Amino acid sequence: MSVGSSFSSFFRPSKVLNSTARATGISAIRVADGGSLRLTQFLKRLTQCESRRAELQHVQKELSSDDSVLLGYAVDAFAPHVAALVQRAETVPDKRVGYTLAALLLADGSDFALMLVNAMLKDLRSRDDNIVIFTLTALAHLMNSDIATAITPSVLKLLVHPSEAIRQRAIVVLECVERCAPDLLVPHRDNIAALLDDPHASVVYAAVGINHRNQYKPLAPRLSSILRIIASERLSDEYNYHSVPAPWFQMRLLRLIADLVYDDAMYRASMPP
């Protein structure tokens, strides 16, 4: 069996692309016989190319078509359809496809990402945890200062959500906000720092990531306490790696504590042993 046929027999994107076509109205996804998909055929031919030049020629030929749907290549004409999919999608699978495509195609400050703000605000209030998670995951890729201004109040409300998975992803999104619009989080430092006491280790790990600026220097003793809890093997065994309790978590804490107190003798003296 050739590489191309092996790959195409494994890759079955029909369900995903049909959802996209149904929500966006994009036509010509299916071949006339209604069986195979154009994308599958494209991928099969691409894997059969014997040189980089042949691959680029094949891609350029496909890009010249008005209805190209490609993986790994920028297709600006597809961006409006991605925005339309997110806005019109009503089911969980369609939302997942829409936000995944948005994260892949609309990143790097795309103007089309701004078109999604209203849809994302609505989805952040969804009663379906999966839709909220898809939205937060996409936001981590799409974040810029304009989007941050619009969505930060809604994301802050999710810090007290019952689901630890949503709280964790909300913190990750706020870390992205911190990079592009840090002033938005200044009034909420205490609420963010409170998540260092969350009962779920995954949430604490995410909270440690955002509580690392100079303004959080007073938290160094608190971070040291978390490090002692991990080192004393008080986390569940699922966080162990080769019998070492949460080694990456420990390394992250050690680096942050060192950065926070490196040039401050007073804080170094106040740190517990």
Image (cartoon, grey):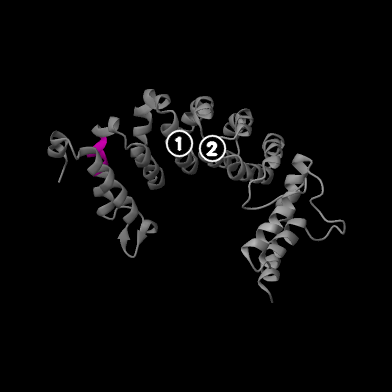
Determine the residue located farthest toward the top in the rendered image: 187
Residue 180 placed where, x, y %?
44, 31
Residue under the point 39% across and 58% down: 238
Circles 2 and 1: CB atoms closer than 8 Å: yes
N-terminal-most mark, 2 or 1: 2
Q: Is residue 231 left or right of residue 7?
A: left
Residue type beneath disc 1: Cys
Number of the label disc, if any, that sits on residue 139: 2
- What residue occupies the far bottom of the structure in this picture? 1
Give the magenta range: 219-224
Q: Which quarter shows the N terminus?
A: bottom right
**Is any part of residue 54 visible from this angle?**
yes
Q: Residue at x 24, y 32 (%)?
A: 218
Instruction: Name the one closer to the observer, 177 or 189.
Output: 177
Q: Which mark is residue 96?
A: none
> Disc number at residue 176?
1
Q: Main secondary structure of the magenta part?
A: helix
From the viewer's perspective, is 196 left or right of 86?
A: left
Q: In this rendering, does residue 246 appear at all?
A: no
- Please, what secondary structure does the residue beneath circle 1 have? helix
Which amino acid lies under the numbered mark 2 shown in the image of this protein?
A: Leu
Tell me, yes or no, whether the highlighted magenta stretch contains residue 223. Answer: yes
35 vs 3, left or right, is right
The structure residue drawn at horizontal position 12% and vertical position 38%, both measured from the top left corner, is 269
Q: Secondary structure at mark 2?
A: helix
Give percent across and percent down for residue 17. Answer: 73, 50
